[in-house]
Structures are given as structure tokens and as C-alpha cells.
Image: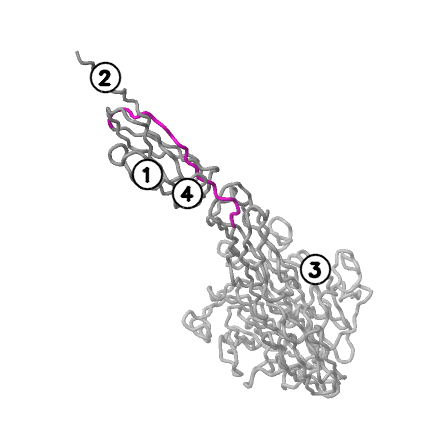
Amino acid sequence: MRIRASVFLALTWGLGAAGARAQSCPAIDLQSMVDASLTNPIFVTHAGDGTERLFIVEQPGAVKVLQPGSTTPTLFLRIPNTRVLSGGERGLLGLAFHPNFASNRRFFVYYTKQQSGDTVIAEYKASEGNPNVADPSPTAATETVLLTFAQPFSNHNGGSMAFGPDGYLYIASGDGGGANDPGNRAQNVNRLLGKILRIDVDTPNGAVPYSSPPDNPYAGATPGFDEIFAIGMRNPWRMSFDRLTGQLLAGDVGQGTREEVSIITLGGNYGWRVMEGTRCNIAGDALPCNSPAFTQPAYEYSHGGGRCAVTGGYVYRGTAGTLPDGTYVLGDFCTGEIFGVDVSDLPLDPGDLPATPNLLRDTPYLLSAFGEDEAGEQYAVGHTGQILRLGAAVRTAPSTAAFDDAGGQGTVAVTSPGGCPAWTAVSNDPWITITAGESGIGNGTVTYTVGANPDVSPRTGTMTIAGRTFEVEQAGGPAPLISVDDVIVTEGLDDTASFTVSLSLASLQTVSVQYETLDGTATASADFVPKALTTLSFDPGETSKPVIVDIHDDALDEDDETLFVLLSGATHAAIDDAQGQGSILDNDPEPSLSIADASFTEGFGVRRVSFMVTLSDASGRPVSVDYVIGPGSATPGTEFRAETGTLAFPPGETRQRLFVWTKGDRLDEADEDFVIDLQGAIHATIATPQATGTIVDDDPPPRTRTSP
């Protein structure tokens, strides 16, 4: 970066930037992170390993590590002064951790080589046994040099490094120094100066410990150095990747008039030395001013008011609400001003350049860098020893609140510096009501109430307090209970069974439940129309829904039967009663029993005769009847067997034979009879309770003898 004589004095004597200008209401607050002395810090970053440590680069050659919650950094690496040439724009200038640092412990530095002033890109490792020091120790760490290139002058050394989303290491090199790039090195593709370089540190190229990505614009047979990614830079002191979009932004320090921020893309030419931002700097080079080959700056501001050198920063993607998401933070080294611009507005139209910077805060510091922590919160680095965390100047505490379903009351404290305009508090949801502190000047308190949540689902609402979003989370109420009732229908009278599925209370959400029918004693298809698994939905506010099951009628007298409706898979509700029973009452009359008289010839000896017992209709139930075989004129034991028993009809049968044992003789006699009485019928009535069995005598009369 270009440092003028007055700035050199400031660096030499450790003075701050001259007189920070009064700012009535800064947009950000600065919190000091260290209480120890630092020597010319020029960068702060993180390792991306989940430890939330900060690493601070000191220009003379040291890297220090700051643990979470600590204000005293410890030594991580010290490159001896026999290697590092420090002073002015030279020294240890850059640091980048490998994306897989947590597992491979690799990190990379950018420094000025002692005596020659060459730029060195080197690799180190963290200690395997102690991640808070370099391997094997902070002062004797093992170095692997990746790349060295000469610097013709002591200024414009660049120094920024960062790994991109593609896993490659990006390196920002200055033009080699001297006013107006006397060697036109920034436009020379056979020099590494005035460029953005990109290398693959994971793929060696023979003895070279890195390779160049094959899509670099000058890779392979294309004339130019393989490592070049973009050209035409003057002194890209600080660059960074937007962690959300992957876009690369570089702050390129100007000559004497303009400071610019450029969006760096593959193969881009950013115009130096022909152009200083949008200003024609040198006419007569191979490419004319405003050549279409040049990429215009995305953002640019003019010198004036002491501004002299841009310090590129980062796009804010943190979660603390320090700044609006997507704010690109940058600063001016000489004035200590911190600016912000909405990255979505970049690049600005050329007609809008140079722009008037949007001042976030005026500081008394020489801003040598900005940095990010793992959470995306940002830090400013003061070259005279400051590491400052950026926070919102107007703050609210807490930033969130949680309530149970009953709701309640809460307060939010507002801290606003003197000189800031009045603030307001507005609820963005009808169930959050601000009851006090709807506006104020300076510090104040906002009181609010949260109404009861009538729904089972949790909800989130917001208030806007002093321009900041305050989030309220509320638990859902008890889940409505879902149940299905029992029903009774009569087979011949009801064509359907209507089950009612009910919610214990109305919901603001759509409630659904699945249901299906199951056989009980009733049989699907024969007795009712089955329902496969079906979804029943309740619109918000509804509390009951019918489930209709079609019932089949028949003419069979049968037992009452059952079927079931089963609930499962409820959403936004809990199942209380999962099974409803449907009872199908039979209304068919019982069949009647009849027995017919029978007659048969007596014959001789024992024989079995039968009577037919009939049902008037088939029954769906087993039918039985008791019988008694008793005497008429016939003598039991001699002419027939008297006995009792039970005659059974399986379901569906309508005829059964009843057998009686008789015995014939040789006597001529009158016809005789016996009776069968039916009684005690089950599942039937008795239409003919008695039958007569007639034994027809078939013996001839005796012959009459005549006396001689």
C-alpha cells in the first residue's frame, strides 16, 4: 500500500490517525479485543477449524493467537528477522489457513525477504501436539517456500492472501512500486507483479510444491505466467471472498486521486497503469484509456479530507445484526473512517463513480485491515496496536425472547449514543403488543406483552426496535386430542354407519389423520364396504368430521356383528381414542322349526326310521332344538326306543333328519304310534312342536284250523 511521508511518521511514532472527525450518531460501535501491546498489527483472521480463535499478524514477523474470551494473545509463529525485512510497506503482510486446516494443520504466509526485498509465499504447519503454536515451535517453525518473486521498489508489495470457494490460494501482488508503475509491470503478463495470482497448493508440479489451475487465463501454451488469475492491479492491499456468494472483492490503493474496490473475475484486466479507477492516468500505452478490455471498478471514492488509501474489508454475513446483511465494509488507512456499501449495489454504474462513501464510523486509528471470525462478525485492525470488534452502536438487549403458550410480558433495553435521533418500537405481529416505550431518545426500555398461543404449533414474531429486529419465539399450546366414537346401526334399517372423528379443540392449522376399517365379527365386503387407508383433514377451526361406512343388508338371522375404524398418523394433533367400534344389530326374524308326521310298516326286527325337521329359512347362526321320543299307543322298549336328544343346524342348513329305532314282531295287531315332541329351540321358533310316528302292522292274521 502507498504510505506518504506523514503516514511514515505516524507509523514511526505510533500515533493515531490525525483527529477523528466528530460523528453525532455512528452506525457501529468498536470493542477492543486485546489488552496487550501489539507491534504494528496488519491483519486478523480465523483458522476455520471450529475453535473460534483469532490470529493476529504483526508486520515485523509474528503471528499471535487469541483464545475465545481472552484479551491476551500468545505467540503462534515468529519468523526471525533474519528472514523478514520489515518497515514501511514491507514485512509479514499476509496469512491464510488451508480450508482443511483442522486436519492437515497447513497455513501460508506472505512476507518480504530480508536483504533482497523479494516477496515470499511460504507454508508452515501448526504443531500436532499443540494447535496454538507452529510446528515444531513458534520460533523454530519449519518453512516450505512455495513461490518467490522480485520487488523492484520498497512499496506496493500487496500482501493479501485468501483461499477461494474452489479450494485454490489467491495471492494479491502489488505492481512493484514506484510512481505510475514505471515498468508497466501490472499490464505485463510475464511478470507476477500487479496481479491476482491463483495456485493449487494441494497438487505439486514435479519439484514445484504447487501447480496452476488449468483454467487460469495464461496457463499452458498461452503466453504469460501460469499463476496469473487477473491483471492490472496497483496495490491490492486487502481482498476477501463473500462467504455467501463466493464473490472476490479487492481494495486497490490508488495513485493520488482515486481509491477503488474491484470485483475480481477470471481473466479480468483492472486497468492500472493506464487507468486509476475511472480516471485516465497515462495515455499512450498499448491500450488506450477507457479501453473495453478494462474492467471498471465496482466502487470508487476520491481523495479529499485526508483520505489517501483504501483498506478493503469483508461483506457482512454475521448473525449478530451488527450491520445489514450484505454490507461490504471498507475503510481509509489515513483518516480512520469505516465505510459501508450494499454489495448488491455493486458494481456501481460508471456514471455514479466516484461515489460518496457511506460513513459507518469515524475512528482515530490507522486502519491496516479488516477481518472476520468464524461466525462472520467483523474486526478492524489499527496499525498502532488495535484489534476492534465491530458491533451495532444502537443496541438492544436481549435480542430474542421465548415464551410458553400462555404468553406473558417482556422488556427490551435500548442503548443509543447521545446525538442519535429518536428511535421507535413497532410490533410486526398482532399477538405482540407494545405497552410502553414506543419511542425514545438515548437509552430506554420497551415493554411488551405476548398473547396466548391458541394453536398447537410454535410461532415466531418480531418487533422492530431502534431499527433492529427483535425476535419472539412462542411455544405451541397443547395439541388437540383426536378421537373416533362408537356407533350402533340396525342392519336392515341403516344403509351406512357414520363414525364421528372429533378434535378436543379447534386448531389454527390444518389437522389431518389417517383412518381405515378393520374386521371385527363382521366380514369386509360381505357385511360392509371396507375403507383402505385414507386421510381425513380438518380445516382450521373445524372440530368434527364424519367417516361413512356402507353397510350390506341380508335376510339371514344372525348374531349382531362388529367392525372397527382405526385412526393413525395424526398431524398437528395427538390421538386420544384410536379405535371406534361399529355394532351392526341384526333385525331378521328367527326361522321356525317344523317336523312332519311319518308312517312306516312294522317289519320284523330292529330298524331305524327317520323324520324330517325343517327350518323355514336359512339362519346365519347355529340353530338347535331338543326332542323327546315318547309313547303313543306303541310300547316303549318293545316297539320303539324312547329317548331324548338335541338336533343341531349349522348356519345355512335348513333340513335335518331325526332317527327313531323301532322293533317289528310276528303278531297280527292293530297299528300303533309314538310321538316326537320338539322343545327348547335356540335361535328359532317351533311352528310344529309334535309329530306322530305310525307303525303300520304288516303281520298276517292267524289261520283258523278246522277239526277233522
Q: CA distance from mark 4 to mark 1?
A: 23 Å
Q: CA distance from mark 4 to mark 3?
A: 107 Å
The residue tagged 4 is 622
Residue at which label 3 appears: 187
Instruction: Report the amino acid beneath label 3.
Output: Gln
- In the drawing, does residue 69 fall left or right of residue 511? left
Q: Quadrant of the N terminus?
A: bottom right
**Residue that numbered label 2 is attached to:** 704
Type of the residue with mark 4:
Pro
Please give the name of the residue rendered at 44% of the width and 42% of the height, measured from the top-left corner.
Answer: 686
Secondary element type, mark 4: loop
Which label number is shown at residue 629? 1
Q: Is residue 257 above or below residue 696?
A: below
Marked residue nearer the N-terminal end (2 or 4): 4
The label shown at residue 509 is none
* Residue 4 appearing in the image: no
Pick the residue in front: 502 or 434: 502
Q: CA distance from mark 3 to mark 1?
A: 129 Å
- What's under tag 1, amino acid-wise? Ile
Residue 274 placement (x, y as % from top left): 76, 62
Stretch of the chain drawn in magenta: 585-605
Q: Which residue extends farthest front?
A: 708
